[in-house]
Image (spheres, grey):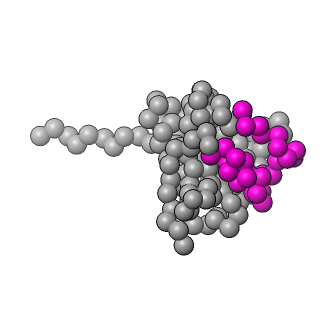
Amino acid sequence: MSPIQLRVARWEDIPAIQLVRNAVRENRLSVAGSIKEADVASYLEARGRGWVCEAGDRIVGFTFADAIDASIWALFLLPEWEGQGLGRRLLETACNWLFAQGVKEIRLSTARHTRAHGFYLKLGWRETGARGNGEAKLRLRRPRAPAAPPAS
């Protein structure tokens, strides 16, 4: 198996990101190709930052953080790469980056009763309601800094 590398997404990654997005088993796009290259590019330049997970020279997963609305816009892995901790690594990277930008609470939404929904809940996200389309709204608050030891 190839070594796994996590790195910041680049323009030239967009075609591979689109391949991963269209290969998922859950949260499939209702209209193939409805997420345009320009949508992905906006997160590379204006809205936030993205990261990819590579195995050798192949992108097997990605995530995007939106600094404008303090959210996770996307987190997807190729089905054969699920269950290996890569989703957690990608999510932690995106959340840590958002918290470093000064965000106090991160939002996302996902379909209820899916593996993704369970994944987020297991990692400490809290459900806060539902969107008009029935997806669960989830939030994660910035961890509190440990208290300073008392002065002696």
Relative side of 78 to 142, left or right:
right
Rendered location of residue 91, percent (x, y): 56, 49
Q: Is residue 65 above or below residue 27?
A: above
Q: Split into 4 quadrants, where in the image is the N terminus?
A: bottom right
Range of magenta residues: 13-38
Q: Is residue 142 above or below residue 25?
A: above
Using the image as rendered, state which of residue 16 and residue 75 is in the foreground: 16
In the picture as drawn, the residue positioned furthest to the right comes out as 31
Using the image as rendered, state which of residue 9 and residue 74 is in the foreground: 9
Image quadrant of residue 65?
Answer: top right
Q: Residue at x 61, y 39 (%)?
A: 11
Q: Is residue 135 above or below residue 83?
A: above
Q: Give the mark count.
A: 0
Relative side of 143 to 11, left or right:
left
Q: Split into 4 quadrants, where in the image is the C terminus?
A: top left
Using the image as rendered, state which of residue 101 and residue 60 is in the foreground: 60
